Image: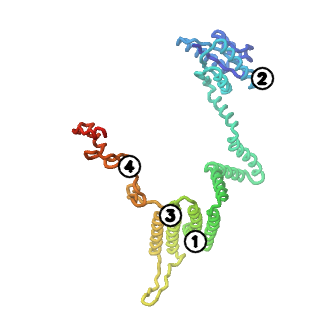
Amino acid sequence: MTTLVVCLDRTDDVGRKTGLRSPIVGWEAVRALVTDVGLADPEDSGVNALLESLRVAQSLRDEDEETVVAVVSGDRESMVSADRAVARQLDDLIETYEPTSAVVVIDSAEDERLVPVVESRVRVDSVDRVVVRQARDIESTYYLLKQFLADEELRQTILVPIGLALLVFPILATLRSPAEGAAAITTVIGLFLLYKGFNVDEILTGVAVKTRTSLYSGQVSVITYVVAVGLTLAGLFAGGLGVSNLEDTQGIYLPAMQFAFDSVPWLVMAALTASAGRLLDEAISEEPIRSSYLNLPFIVVSIGLVARGFAAYFLEQEGVVDPIHVPGYDQGILTIDPFTIAGGNRLALSVAAGILVGLVGIKVAATFSGTEPDDGDGVVETPEPDPETNPPEETTEPRATAGAEAHPNGGTAEAASDAEEVGELESGDADGESLS
């Protein structure tokens, strides 16, 4: 069992500095090579890689394992020719020494690209990368930046915005002022970071895909969604118009209540329109309607009643809206005097109406969605089958009174056989013995 300890040098630093041709094989030859490379360039990390190869070979020899230490270098012409040169040298070493495994020693990420070449020819038990302590941070940073610049997506995400900012800033600073230029650049960069941070691009892509699928499948909800968007815009316009009609007020509390009071009916109608379209799509499909779609319109109306009730209460306290005046009614024996609903009564009536609508929605959803309510322990009870419409399945186990031949002495043949097995059948009836 022979282990090949091979030190890889893809760029042929050893041959360029010492003038020697690889492969260099043997303990003494590699030991002399350490001196030659160290004298030629004491700062080269290849010296440490050569010493590591000797150390690994010595530790394997101490464990009574036969080892062959070698240095394999590439070619300086191109990376392809370098890899092929390393492959030829490895083939010669394997043919000469017939190793069963290999330990690869490298000192850079460039040399690490040769590891698959070694693995394709002999089993690699270990890859030992040597990094000089003083240069570890510098080398790691260098290869990290190199890998970063090689990623196209990262370049477009990071370098392109920075480059545009550096180009636009001098123009804005010249035309306007440095402060305005810096403010504009930071605003754009901030919007871009939020755009990427919240995955707005993925959300817009998902919306576009769903819209295209809905258009091609002919869903009713596409039309209702468009109407809902129009109603939403109308609600926002109505709310803004109501705020503009207010007199000069301090703070934003009263304008916010006025905006909610005027826009909530339109927003509720928009939500009802959108949910109605989705409900129609569920009704048209062959699948049963889910309870969430049935309950959604009632929840929307309930929230709208409560929100408008609170807004009306606060606006009434400020004298912006008037109480509700209910006219009288006189029809025969039924007479209702006119009355006014104001203040807390109006708020309580809105909250009660919202709760009532919500409960009605839950009941309607439970009734028409086909789901059975549970009994409180989380287990849904299964109704017993109707024997007339759904008769119980027949059991496959044999019964003592059905499917067996009658015994002459009474009972069944199966019962007689069981009795005979346990020694309880005392009669020597010939018919019984034949049946058993």
Q: Are marks 2 and 1 in contact (CB under 8 Å)?
A: no
Q: Residues within 10 Å of mark 1 (few under 14, many from 20)?
A: many
Amino acid type of disc 2?
Answer: Glu
Q: Is residue 137 visible?
A: yes
Amino acid type of disc 1?
Answer: Asp
Q: Residues within 10 Å of mark 3 (few under 14, many from 20)?
A: many
Amino acid type of disc 3?
Answer: Asn
Find numbered disc 1 in the image and state the secondary structure of the residue it sits on.
helix
The residues tagged by marks 4 and 3 sit, at their Cα atoms, a distance apart of 43 Å
Q: Which residue is under mark 4?
A: 395
Q: Which residue is under mark 3?
A: 295
- The extreme top residue here reads 28
| Left or right of 5 on screen, residue 64 | left
The residues tagged by marks 2 and 4 sit, at their Cα atoms, a distance apart of 84 Å
Q: Are marks 4 and 3 in contact (CB under 8 Å)?
A: no
Q: Is residue 107 visible?
A: no
- The extreme left residue here reads 426
The residues tagged by marks 1 and 3 sit, at their Cα atoms, a distance apart of 25 Å
Image quarter of the N terminus: top right
The residues tagged by marks 1 and 4 sit, at their Cα atoms, a distance apart of 68 Å
Q: Which residue is under mark 1?
A: 262
Q: Which residue is under mark 2?
A: 77
Find numbered disc 4 in the image and state the secondary structure of the residue it sits on.
loop
The residues tagged by marks 3 and 2 sit, at their Cα atoms, a distance apart of 74 Å
Q: Earlier in the sequence, mark 3 or mark 2?
A: 2
